[in-house]
Every structure is written in structure tokens, then in C-alpha cells.
Amino acid sequence: MAEEENVDIEPVPDEDEPTNYRPPPEKTLDEMIAKDTEDESLRKYKETLLGGSVAGAVVIDPGNPSRVLVRKLVLVPEGQPEMYLNLSEDMDKIKDATFTIKEGISYKIRIDFHVQREIVTGLKYVQRTFRKGILVDKMTHMVGSYAPKEEVQSYTTPTEDAPSGLIARGHYTVKSLFTDDDGNQHLKWEWSFNIKKEWE
């Protein structure tokens, strides 16, 4: 387990393809709303896109300066009830929680979150999976850009298949990170799952 503790969760360089993409310069919500006010169709489009943010800053948790409040990780196995982790709990409690899934099943992961104060661009979900301290899987999903809203927003990964067979059964540790184009770490957490022959 000592090896796992020292593994960094930052994206692995060899999986990042070279790109000329540069995030656009950051603009505040007020700057975006104030621009092009004389264009009625653009104003209506902004209202549709930004929802309640047009009326003023949406603040969900006044005591938390973060723009993204990650609420829940939901494991969505095909044909089975959803299982979830409440990510607003203590990180040690989350780290000790373990899902049990049947080998070979298809599943998705959904992240529920709030965006407050300002628009957040280029959200990413990064996940590294370890077995006995060895990295066995890594993935980075582009989540997108989101405006502040009172409602919970969510991102669901594409369908994945759990490994199967005697060798695949056992305990896995996952290091997850919700980040963005600007390198802000909105939440970094650990969780785990067991793969078994049958559902328990």
C-alpha cells in the first residue's frame, strides 16, 4: 500500500496528445453578460445558456469560495441499483467506503456537482485505478464548461466493462480528481471497489 500513497494523480504525460489548444482568456460572468447588450437575440441566448446567473451571481455555499462543489460519485451498473459516495463527507470516510461489483458487468460513473459564482471552463474527470499498488487503468474524461446554477449538474462517463476472470477478482483502489483547464483541483479523493464472481 505504501506504493499507492506515493502515486501522483496528475495526468500521465504519455496519454496527453500534443495539441495547440489554449484555453480562452478568462472572463467574469458580469463581463459576459454586459457584452453585446444591444443585440436582443444574443441577450436571449445568454439568458437561455446562463439561466439564473444572468440575474446575479449564483452562490450555493457562501462559506466556500470554490467555483465547483463536487457532491457525489455514482456508480451506475447495468441492470442493478445505483451505488454512490457522498463526496461532501470526510475524505477518510470516503476512502474507507468500498463498492462491490460483479465481474464483467457494464457500468458508468456519474459525477454530480454544483457550479457557483463564475463560469468554469474545461472541466475534466481524471481517474487512476490500482491493484496491489500497481497502476492497472487510467482515464481522463473531458466534462465540459458549465455556468453557475442552483440545480445540481452532472457528467456521466461512457460505458466501461469491469474485468472478469479469476485473476481480475479482488480489491482495487481508485484515485479520482475533478480539475479544469486552469489546473484548479476542485476535488481529489480516493475510493475503492471489489470485483467478485457474483453480486452480494
Image (tube, rainbow, N blue to C red):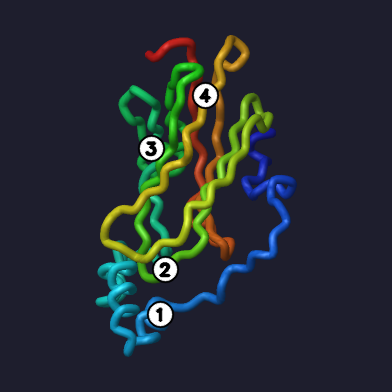
As rendered, which of 149 and 50 lies closer to the eye? 50
**Quick check: 38 above or below 53?**
below
As rendered, which of 197 and 89 lies closer to the eye? 197
Please rate how many residues cluster around mark 2, counting C-alpha atoms within 10 Å: few if below 14, some from 14 to 19, many from 20: many
Q: Quadrant of residue 42?
A: bottom left
C-alpha separation, residue under disc 2 versus residue under disc 1: 10 Å
1 or 3: mark nearer the eye: 1
- Residue hosting label 2: 119
Give the amino acid type for the residue marked by disc 1 in the picture: Met
The secondary element bearing badge 3 is classed as: strand
Residue 17 at what x, y percent from top left?
70, 52
Q: Quadrant of residue 102?
A: top left
C-alpha separation, residue under disc 2 versus residue under disc 3: 24 Å
- Residue hosting label 4: 162
Disc ID at residue 32:
1
Please rate how many residues cluster around mark 1, counting C-alpha atoms within 10 Å: few if below 14, some from 14 to 19, many from 20: few
The secondary element bearing badge 1 is classed as: helix
Disc ID at residue 74:
3
Q: Tell me: 92 left or right of 173.
A: left
C-alpha separation, residue under disc 1 versus residue under disc 3: 33 Å
Give the amino acid type for the residue marked by disc 4 in the picture: Ala
